[in-house]
Image (cartoon, helix red, strand yellow):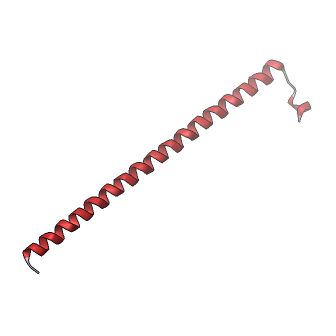
């Protein structure tokens, strides 16, 4: 195997490594994006649940609804 063939093989391996690195970077960034979106959805859901619970408690206290009769 001559010097030119070794260089060509090295260049091919370098290109392959570069492509794989860029692909993995894209996958990692996509994963981080999806994870961030999921965390955002969970946070918004928890905030909505908190406010819903808050208004139910407020309604019960304001109207003095006896929950024992409803259940």
Q: Position of residue 30 (x, y in %)?
A: 42, 49
The residue shown at (29%, 59%) is 19
Q: Nearer the viewer, residue 27 or 45?
A: 27
Task: Establish if 39 lies above or below 17.
Answer: above
Q: Nearer the viewer, residue 8 or 66?
A: 8
Q: Position of residue 34 (x, y in %)?
A: 48, 47
Question: Could you tell whether 13 is left or right of 30 in the image?
Answer: left
Task: Establish if 19 lies above or below 8.
Answer: above
Question: Could you tell whether 26 is left or right of 35 in the image?
Answer: left
Q: Which image quadrant is residue 21 in?
A: bottom left
In this view, the residue farthest toward the bottom is: 1
Image quadrant containing the N terminus: bottom left
The residue shown at (74%, 22%) is 58
Number of labels in the image equals 0
In this view, the residue farthest toward the left is: 3
Task: Establish if 5 lies above or below 55.
Answer: below
Question: Could you tell whether 43 is left or right of 66 in the image?
Answer: left
In this view, the residue farthest toward the top is: 62
Q: Position of residue 53 (x, y in %)?
A: 71, 30
Q: Position of residue 2 (x, y in %)?
A: 8, 78
Q: Which image quadrant is residue 14 in?
A: bottom left
The residue shown at (34%, 53%) is 25
Image quadrant containing the C terminus: top right
């Amino acid at each position: 195997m001559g010097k030119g063939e070794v260089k060509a093989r090295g260049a091919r391996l370098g290109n392959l490594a570069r492509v794989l690195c860029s692909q993995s970077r894209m996958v990692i960034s996509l994963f981080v994006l999806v994870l961030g979106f999921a965390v955002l959805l969970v946070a918004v859901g928890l905030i909505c649940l908190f406010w819903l619970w808050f208004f139910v408690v407020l309604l019960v206290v304001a109207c003095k609804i006896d929950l024992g009769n409803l259940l």
